[in-house]
Amino acid sequence: MTFLDTNILLKVIDSFKTDYIVQLSKFHTAYVAKTSTKPESISEKENLTGDWKVDGDSAYDFLTVALDERLPYRSFQQIDPSRIVMDIFGVRSNTNWIKNFMSAKEVKNAWYEQTEDDVMRVFIELKHNQQWGYSIYYAGNKLTVRIKRQPPVTDLQHLTIAIDAGHGGDNHGATGITSHILEKEYTLLLAKETEQELLKRKARVVMTREKDTTLSMEERIIQLNKHEPDLLVSIHLNSSDMDTVQGVSTYYRYIGFKPLSVAILNQMLTLGLKEYGNVGSFNFGLNGITEYPNCLVEVAFLSNKEDEKKIRDPGFRRRVAIKIADGIEQFLQNL
């Protein structure tokens, strides 16, 4: 449903294998890993909203709402117009007004609706069509949405691009159908080629790994967020039970980040690869990041002989790197 901050109050009503089932509101439940929780004894009470505020600092806009407890939430994106939408579970409106300050530069409008007796829906309408990311967290009991503004200059020379080489270390990924090459080795080769191409175009580049390292999704996300990149591209190689399946595909989870994945797919198709599609609502760890636009690229299928041959070709890998960089530039030109 999206990531949660720490020390969120969750009501456990059942369990299923390694997860707890939690009651978010009267009509909403969710799953959370048991290893991510600790028991607390609490008394149930009605929670009311407190003060609301929209303001900004030198880099971000903020929406904050005071709550009685650190309650669970979820968020999603809308387009045309561009909005961040957040549901806060287990709370009722206390007929609060929203203070708006001129220091907010990206938030165009903000309002809330009591969609259910115990669910508050918050709308944050943005000035730019393209969403550049946001994070949700608690400062004490104040629920905060930090909204990233569109960079003042949107060209590669002024942006930080994160490149993720999929898998690595103990996680081998897919295996070549004839050569038995490992996905983890060739995603790293592709990532390094892409890094060099972006550096050639004067971008700042952050790599999640530069050698055969075991990294969990959590470790990758923590590492990436420290660098606060403007965009993220995660590079993978696909596989199928059917050796006739082939082609390139790109993936996104949040609709506001779709344009990056479409731009990269358009450029990758100029390599003569078959199209496997642009896939949305994709539940991959690095697509779950809301802090910056992100895209997963499945370059081709290791389970297909024709695609596997291309992947092993250094010239092809070089062309892939050029097309990923071209896709990023096309995305920026379309803003």
Image: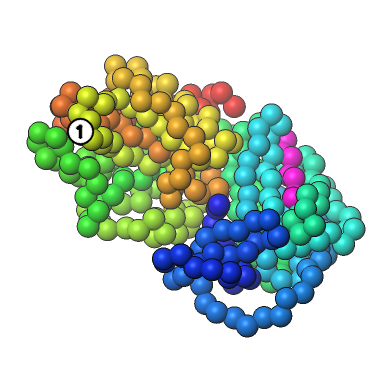
Answer few, some or many: residues within 10 Å of disc 1's Cα (few below 14, many 20 plus, some between 14 and 19). many
Farthest-out residue, bottom? 41
Quarter occupied by the C terminus: top right
The picture places residue 63, in percent across and down from the top left corner, at 74, 54
Q: Quadrant of residue 324?
A: top left
- Way the structure is coloured: rainbow
At mark 1, the secondary structure is loop
Q: In the image, 39: left or right of 116?
A: left
Q: In the image, 170: left or right of 224?
A: left
Residue 10 makes an appearance in the image: yes
Residue 143 makes an appearance in the image: no
Residue at image location 10% in from the left, 33% down from the top: 178
Counting the numbered discs, the total is 1
Q: Which residue is mark 1?
A: 303
Residue at image location 39% in from the left, 47% down from the top: 206
The picture places residue 232, in percent across and down from the top left corner, at 45, 42
Residue 123: say if magenta.
yes
Residue at image location 58% in from the left, 69% down from the top: 13
Residue 198 sits above or below residue 244 on the image: below
The picture places residue 323, in percent across and down from the top left corner, at 36, 25
What residue range appears in magenta? 121-127
Residue 109 sits above or below residue 13 on the image: above
**Amino acid on which disc 1 is placed:** Ser
Q: Main secondary structure of the magenta part?
A: strand
Residue 15: say if magenta.
no
